[in-house]
Image: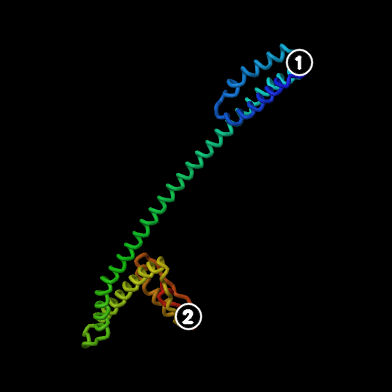
Amino acid sequence: QVDQFQLIKAVVLLLAMAATAITASSLRGALLATFAVPVAAYAYAGARQWMPVELIMAGLLIVSLPFFAYVARHLNRSSLMLLSFRSEKDALIAELDTAKSMSDEARRRAEDANLAKSRFLASMSHELRTPLNAILGFSEVMANEVLGPMSNPTYRDYARDIHDSGQHLLDLINEILDLSRIEAGRYQLNEEPMMLLSVVEDCCHMMELKARNKDIRIVQDFERALPRLFADERAVRQ
């Protein structure tokens, strides 16, 4: 006759080992330390009674103990790997937050520097344009001999050179301001029909002095009867 109480004890031990293997997987050796003695006692009692069913259950418990111990070790390794991955993820998130804060700080500094540069250029352009307008006006008066003729024609040529150089410097100032407007996205083209030939000749004339100082000869070779170009003259010069 099969002892129902012994079978119930075996099933309870089996379920308890399975539950302990899952819940206490983080405690290494807890399963063996908890169920080694109960399983040995049950196997000893089943061997004394020599009942086939109890012997089978005892063998099942003995085999299940190392199996559940293996399962617990595997779960423990998986938990450790999961914790390791989580810590790496947290470290990466922390690095990303640090990099983002550094990037935001660098962007803020760049915006402040760009704003300071724009203010400096606006102030300097105003300070430079005031004397340049006087230079351009007086040199034009002298070149055109408004207040009277010049006895020496060389002086008149010098006045034209002064006017051309001042106009060139004023154009450079406007180009620098145009760069600031381009960076700010506020640059507007003033397009109108223009003669490309005159623009090219003026540019070559401005570059001849620099080229001559470096022993470079500028050769102009283009069609004389070019049609008008619809564009911004200052942008084409740039």
- Check disc 2: other Cα within 10 Å, few if <14, some if 14-19, many if 20+: few
Q: Nearer the viewer, residue 128 or 59?
A: 59
Check the image and report above or below for 209 versus 55.
Answer: below
Q: Is residue 1 left or right of residue 104?
A: right
**Disc 2 residue type?**
Phe
What residue did someone put label 1 on? 51
What residue did someone put label 2 on? 230
Q: Are marks 2 and 1 in contact (CB under 8 Å)?
A: no
Q: Secondary structure at mark 1?
A: loop
Identify the mark at residue 148; answer none if there is no mark. Answer: none
**Disc 1 residue type?**
Met
Q: Reading the chain from its start, which is encountered first: label 2 or label 1?
A: 1
| Residue drawn at (76%, 19%) of the image | 2
Q: Nearer the viewer, residue 218 or 101?
A: 101
Check the image and report above or below for 26 versus 159.
Answer: above
Q: Position of residue 189 (x, y in %)?
A: 43, 75
| Quadrant (top left/top right/bottom left/bottom right) for the N terminus | top right
Residue 235, by quadrant, is bottom left
Q: Position of residue 158 (x, y in %)?
A: 26, 78
Q: Nearer the viewer, residue 234 or 52?
A: 52
- Check disc 1: other Cα within 10 Å, few if <14, some if 14-19, many if 20+: some
Alpha carbon separation for disc pair 2 and 1 = 109 Å
